[in-house]
Image: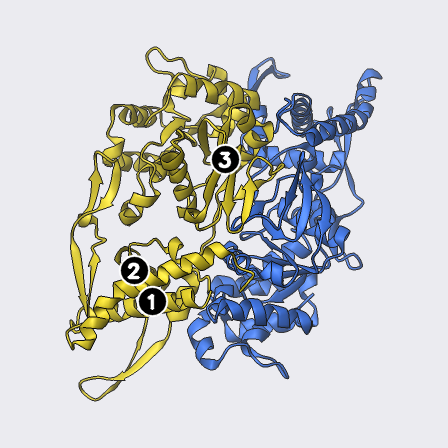
Chain colours: A blue, B yellow
Amino acid sequence: MAYASSVDSEVRRKCIKVFQEKFAKLIKNILEEKTPTLVIPKRTLSNTIYDEKRKMLLLGPELLRRSFLDINESKRFMQTILMAAIIYDALVNNEYPTIRDLYYRGKHTIRYIDHKGKVVEENTWDEQRESDAVIRDLEVFLGLLREELLILSKEKGKVVGNMRIRSGDDVIDLSKMGHGAYAIEPTPDLIEFLDVDAEFVLVVEKDAVFQQLHRYGFWKKYKAILITSAGQPDRATRRFVRRLSEELKLPIYILTDADPYGWYIYSVFKIGSITLSYESERLATPDAKFIGVAMTDIFGYKGKKPWLTPQEAKNFIIKAKEADIKRAKELLNYKWFQTKEWRREIEIFLDKKAKLEIEALASKGLRFLADVYIPRKIETGDWIS
Amino acid sequence: MAYASSVDSEVRRKCIKVFQEKFAKLIKNILEEKTPTLVIPKRTLSNTIYDEKRKMLLLGPELLRRSFLDINESKRFMQTILMAAIIYDALVNNEYPTIRDLYYRGKHTIRYIDHKGKVVEENTWDEQRESDAVIRDLEVFLGLLREELLILSKEKGKVVGNMRIRSGDDVIDLSKMGHGAYAIEPTPDLIEFLDVDAEFVLVVEKDAVFQQLHRYGFWKKYKAILITSAGQPDRATRRFVRRLSEELKLPIYILTDADPYGWYIYSVFKIGSITLSYESERLATPDAKFIGVAMTDIFGYKGKKPWLTPQEAKNFIIKAKEADIKRAKELLNYKWFQTKEWRREIEIFLDKKAKLEIEALASKGLRFLADVYIPRKIETGDWIS
C-alpha cells in the first residue's frame, strides 16, 4: 500500500487503538462471563438539545444499554458488533469502505436453530437504512465521525482562494487552480491549513454561480475563500467550513437563493441537521451568517431600499409554490428561526409568496453581484446571523 | 478585469470576431432593405443521423430559414437576435453568464400596437426551456458550443492522475491533489495538456468509488487518469474525456453500475444524447469502452466464469424494477446497442431481472476491485465497445 498516503497510515493506527480501548470492556465482560453490554449515547430526538449558548444541536446526557442477552436488543447488539468488526478489518487491511459497501460487506443470512428446534434464517440487515443506523451508533460509541474511520463518501464541495493546504502527502495551492477548482476530500479533518491570506469565506449554494464568481476573480479582488456546496451541503463541506471558522477565525457568509430551500441550506451549515445532532458538535458553524438573497433585498424594508427596480422585480420574481409555503411555516417552528430578523424574512415571504434565485442578481451583471451586492452587504453588515 | 485569466480575454476576441462575421450578412440584408433572414442547421430528430463509420450522432444537411417578415417565424427570429445581442454584450463586457441568467437577462415584456390598433403585450420568453432552445440555435448558427462563448454552468467532473495541465494562467499538477481532486472547469476546450504519463483513462460513474480508487492509489499503481462523472455526465466532463481520447490517444474505459442507467451513462459518453446530436461531434468519444460491471461478470457466459460466488450473488444482486426493464427494452432500439455483445448483455438482464452496483464489487475488498477486477478486465480485453 505504498500508493496510499502516509497520513492515512497514521489515522489507521490511532483508530485501531480507539477500537481496542473502547471494546476492551466488552471483552472483559465476556471473559468474566458477565452479560456483554454496550453503553451508547442515545441518538433520539428527545435526547437532542438545542444549546442556546453554543447555538448548536447537541446530544443530551441519556445513554442506552445494548445487551446481548436481552431478546429485544440482541439483534441490534449483534449488528453493532458485526459492523464494528467489518470497520476494524477495513482499518487493518488498508481498505477505504463507503457506507454503501459496508452495507454489502455485512449483508448475509444467518441460519440458526431456535428454542423450538426449528431451523430459522435471518438476514443481518435488509436495507442500507439499517446498516447506516448501526454505523451512527458506532460513531457515537467510539466518539469518532465515520470520516475519521476512513469511511469515504461522495463529495460535492469545491474551494478556491488565497490559501495553501496540506492534504495527504501533497501541498496544494488553492490560488493556482486555473479555471477549475479544488474538490474537497471526504475526510477534511486530515487537511492541514498552511498559509491563508483571506479576510472572509463566501459559501455559494449554487455551483454555477461559484463558477461565475471564480472566473470573474472575485476571491482575488476581495481576498475571499470561495466555496460551493453544490446544493444541500454534505458532511465534508460542512466540516471544512466549520474548521475555517473555528481555527482561522474567518467570517463565514452563506449565499443562497431567496426561498425556504436556501434558508434550510444555511441552517444546515449553521446549526446542523435535526436527525443527526451528534454530528453538529463537529460539523456546524454557529457563526455562519446568511448574507442573502434576503426578502428585504427584494422588497426593501423600512429604511432599506430594494436592490431590484420594479421592472426587474416583475421579470425575476418566481411565484412560491404550496410546498415552499408549507416549508416556510415549518421553519418557523425551529428555535433558531425565531429571531426578529428571521421572522421578518419568513413573514415577507409568506405575505408576498415570492422567491428569487441568485442567478437573477447575476443577470443584472456579474459586476453587480460581485462588485456591488456582495461587498456592500458585507461592508454594511446587512446579513442575518 | 485584471482578475480574470488572460486565456479568457483571447477567447472573447475570437468569439466577437465570429459574431461579427456571422451576422454581417444579416446586417447587409437590412442595409439593402432585403428581408432579414437567418439560415440555421436544423436540430430536429429527422435531421439527426447516426454515422456508422464515425460511430456518432451528427446533424444532417437540412437547413431552416428564419425570416423576420414571416409571421410564423418572426417571434423566434427576434428571440434569436435578442439572445445573440445579450451573449455578444456579455462577451464585450467581460461577463460570464450561465444559461439560467441568460434566461433572466432576456426576460421582459414587449408592448406594441397590433394591426387593429390595439395595445398588445408579449413576453420575450416565459420559461428557460424557450431561451435554452434559442441558445442551441445560436450554437449551431455560430458553429460554437456555448462553453466556447464563455457561458458557464455547474460542473461535476473530477480528475486525478499523472498529468499536468494549463488552465487559465496556472499550471496544475493533477498528481498532487492530496486526498482531494481537481474539479474540471466548465470550459474544457481551454485546457492545455502539458505532460501526460498515463496508459489509460478510467471513468467511474460514482463519485464514492472514485474516492475509494483514488485514495487507494489506483491511478499511481496502474498509470491511469482517474475521472468521475458523478452520475450522468455533464458536457464539460464529456468534452474532457473526448479530448483525452482524441488528442492523447489514450484508451477510455467506463465503469458503471450493472443496470440500464449505467449503460445509458456509457452511451452518453460514447455516442452523445439523441436530442442534442449537434453537440456529439465535439463531446462524444466513439472509442470509449464499457469495462463493466457487465452481466457476464455477474452470471458468467459460456467459457467465462462469474466474478461472484453464489453466496455473494445472493447477497449483492438487486432485483430489477419495472422501470429498469422498460428502459432496457428501449435501449435495444438504439442502433449502437444492437451489437452482439450488447444484445447479450441486455438479454441476460431481461432474463435474470437483476442489477448490481459497483460498490458490491468494492465490498469484496477494494483490492479485489482495484488489483484484480479492473486490471484483469483490461489485460484480457474483456470489455464491450
Q: Which residue is mark 3?
A: B195
Q: Quarter of the image for the C terminus of chain A: give it.
A: bottom right
Of the two numbered discs 3 and 1 on the same chain, state the one appearing first in sequence: 1
Residue in front for this viewpoint, B137 or A63: B137
Residue in front for this viewpoint, A331 or A139: A139
Q: Position of residue B304 (x, y in %)?
A: 37, 13
Up the image or down, B334 lies above or below A2; here it is below
Looking at the image, residue A7 sits to the left or right of residue A345; the answer is: right
Q: Which residue is mark 1?
A: B83
Q: Amino acid at mark 1?
A: Met
Q: Quarter of the image for the N terminus of chain A: give it.
A: top right
| Mark 1 residue crowding within 10 angstroms, few (<14) / some (14–19) / many (20+) | many
Q: Amino acid at mark 3?
A: Asp
Question: Can residue A348 be seen in the rendering of this structure?
Answer: no
Q: Position of residue B230 (x, y in %)?
A: 48, 41
Q: Amino acid at mark 2?
A: Leu
At horizontal 17% and vertical 59% (from top left) the residue drawn is B64
| Mark 3 residue crowding within 10 angstroms, few (<14) / some (14–19) / many (20+) | few
Q: What kind of element bears circle 3?
A: strand
Of the two numbered discs 2 and 3 on the same chain, state the one appearing first in sequence: 2
